[in-house]
Image: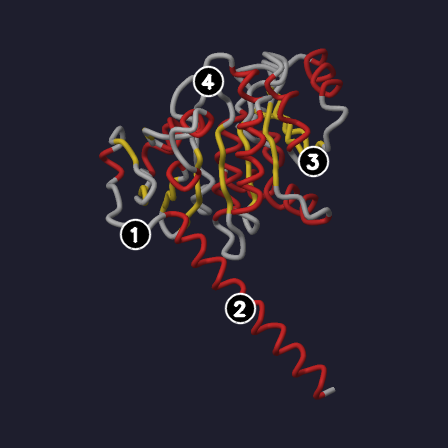
Amino acid sequence: MEEIREALERSKASDLIAAERRRRQHLARLGPTLSPTIDARTQGQELHATQEFRLDAAHLQSKRIIAHNHADAQSTAFDMLRTQVLQSMDLKNWKFLGVTSPTPGCGKTVTAVNLALSIARQPERSVLLVDLDLRKPQVATSLGLKPNQGVTSLLEGRSTLADTINQVRIGDHVMMVLPTESSTPRSSDRMASRAMSEILQQIKKDYQSEIVIFDLPPILSSDDVLAILPLLDCVLLVAAVGTSTVAEIAESNKHLQSAEIVRVVLNKAPPSNSQYYYY
């Protein structure tokens, strides 16, 4: 028994050392300093990789981003979604989750951002939110960021991953964000490019401890999602009451046959169905 106890203690110490090493490597990738922070009221100011951006709660509320606040009753739905998704992903050691919808207007970005913030509230988890909706990027706008570097500059070789990933904070909760700074022409070509594949490979290598959430384009709007599917572990499909038709959902499922779908979210449901109310 004593040998087992000592072995467990050595294992725990080793885990703590490894965790601290990952933390230091993570901070090193961000740059020499994470301060000074940017006041939320300066939204619209350009960001730099070594800065931490303090999010503005009022702006988040205006964009329907509420999952950072556990006191908000509506955040419970995203917490439930978080638990279900993470349980499915943990079973297979998945790290890359894509969030898509049949068509625009279903609330996929709102769902992706709220899900990421809900995960960020868990002290044992860390999350990286990546905007891969190259035609209509909305993650930065939802968070109140105006980055001068992002996925586009990465694809064009004008910046490095460390330059483009931003750390954002709301209250005591922190997450990482890789935005797309502007709309990108020829998005399907970019999604299927070797450069995109290399970016995702580098994320997988450098951010092994993070859950990585990719906000993808609507699946029926272009072939962008089909190009990136082989590089993802699983997909969350967001449909919306009054927006998505049964035919569109069926067509989306057909395109996603080669992917692992962890959940289908029915968004914009009446509040009376609040157990599964995402918006």
- Gap in Å between the C-alphas at discs 1 and 3? 37 Å
**Local secondary structure at mark 3:** strand
The three-letter amino acid code for the residue at tag 2 is Leu
- Gap in Å between the C-alphas at discs 2 and 1? 23 Å
The three-letter amino acid code for the residue at tag 1 is Thr
Which residue is pictured at 66% across the width and 20% down the height?
226
Q: Is residue 279 left or right of residue 250?
A: left
Q: Which is more N-terminal, label 1 or label 4?
A: 1
Give percent across and percent down for residue 247. 72, 11
Q: Which is more N-terminal, label 3 or label 1?
A: 1
Q: Which is more N-terminal, label 3 or label 4?
A: 4
Give percent across and percent down for residue 277. 58, 31
Give percent across and percent down for residue 129. 49, 37
- Gap in Å between the C-alphas at discs 4 and 1? 31 Å
**Residue bearing the label numbered 1:** 33
Q: Dots 1 and 3: beta carbons under 8 Å? A: no
Which residue is pictured at 44% across the width and 43% down the height?
176
